[in-house]
Amino acid sequence: MKIAFVGKGGSGKTTLSSLFIRHLAFRDTPVVAVDADINQHLGAALGLDDQETAALPALGAHLPLIKEHLRGTNPRIASAETMIKTTPPGEGSRLLRLQEDNPIYDACAREVALEGARIRLLATGPFTESDLGVACYHSKTGAVELLLNHLVDGREESMVVDMTAGSDSFASGMFTRFDMTFLVAEPTRKGVSVYRQYKEYARDYDVPLKVVGNKVQGEDDLDFLRQEVGEDLLVAVGHSDWVRAMEKGRPRPFAELEESNSRALHALFQAVDAVYETRDWERYTRQMVHFHLRNAESWGNAKTGADLAAQVDPSFVLGEQRRETVVPQSAQSTPQPA
Ligand SMILES: Nc1ncnc2c1ncn2[C@@H]1O[C@H](COP(=O)(O)OP(=O)(O)OP(=O)(O)O)[C@@H](O)[C@H]1O
Ligand SMILES: [Mg+2]
């Protein structure tokens, strides 16, 4: 299941994604955690020290490897250079699974011991506001979009992305790539303004969106959120002494997280699980093609000098049951009879 945490700066995206990732690890659900936020803090929130965080490989620095791997033997994608962040998979492309070993995880993922399990952590690498431009070829989140578009994930496994609700994710279609988007909102006008913007974009694409109230202090806060976001409000998380202790460098066992906050995390898990049955891979594939064509026309064709619409494999549908069709090297070089 693909899950995003978005929201205003400082709302608690990283805190809530890291708590949710711990919750999944605690219940032995395999997780790939992805830090795609401007401020790269997910590693620290998962307990890595400064040195370990600094040593995290940046996905953005491995784009050529990522593209080369995913391209596989797809004849519609002539080279990694013509592959942009929205290039969809087709026959011959390599698909990704959450629980496998592959060259991308080898180069970019770090294993993190968490709540008695081991999870994988990927990070885009730090980026600046200028990286959030609409027509950005070098967009740091491009690597994450490519991974999402080539991922065939099942029910009891998750990719959790801590990300920014920037214009880039709207232009590229990244906001449509998730089974569930948790919008973290503090009970303030600014806090819910990102929700409004997201809702507006999400409406046309049937993006499952739930609001997670954070730093909610009482009935008045709760009333405010209910009034502003209505039924989209899933749960509210209060101030957490457990989180504060962690911030002080005095981490406590996860089992000591406040009961009400544990219940909130379980509600998130249930909300994710509930959408599994309604997943629609055909729509997922259609939307990625839609955004690819849009990006190709607005900047991709000009940037690569190729007709990127030709990368679309019209009969290809991504799906959980899909088998790889990458042709092994040996078979490619076998001489064909005349
Ligand atoms: N429920 C909570 N209880 C206690 N502290 C919290 C809670 N939620 C967030 N915080 C604190 O608020 C601060 C901001 O949270 P966090 O870094 O998770 O936000 P963010 O949305 O990821 O921010 P940024 O936009 O900078 O990435 C942190 O110091 C965090 O520890
Ligand atoms: Mg953050």
Image (cartoon, rainbow, N blue to C red):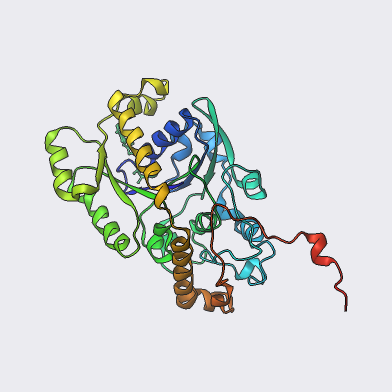
User: How many marks on residues?
Assistant: 0
**Image position of 72 with respect to 19: above or below:** below
**Image position of 9 with respect to 87: above or below:** above
Counting from the top left corner in percent of width and height, residue 140 is at 50, 57
What residue appears at the point 64 percent right and 47 percent down from the top-left corner? 107
Q: Quadrant of the C terminus?
A: bottom right
Q: Is residue 309 visible?
A: yes
Q: Is residue 163 visible?
A: no
Counting from the top left corner in percent of width and height, residue 174 is at 43, 59
Q: Nearer the viewer, residue 141 or 130?
A: 141
Q: Nearer the viewer, residue 255 or 28?
A: 28
Counting from the top left corner in percent of width and height, residue 38 is at 42, 50
Q: Nearer the viewer, residue 228 or 30?
A: 30
Q: Nearer the viewer, residue 138 or 252?
A: 252
What residue appears at the point 43 percent right and 34 percent down from the top-left corner? 45
Q: Quadrant of ligand 2?
A: top left
- Image quarter of residue 87: bottom right
**Image position of 1 with respect to 50: above or below:** below
Specify whether 66 is left or right of 297.
right
**Image position of 152 with respect to 157: above or below:** below
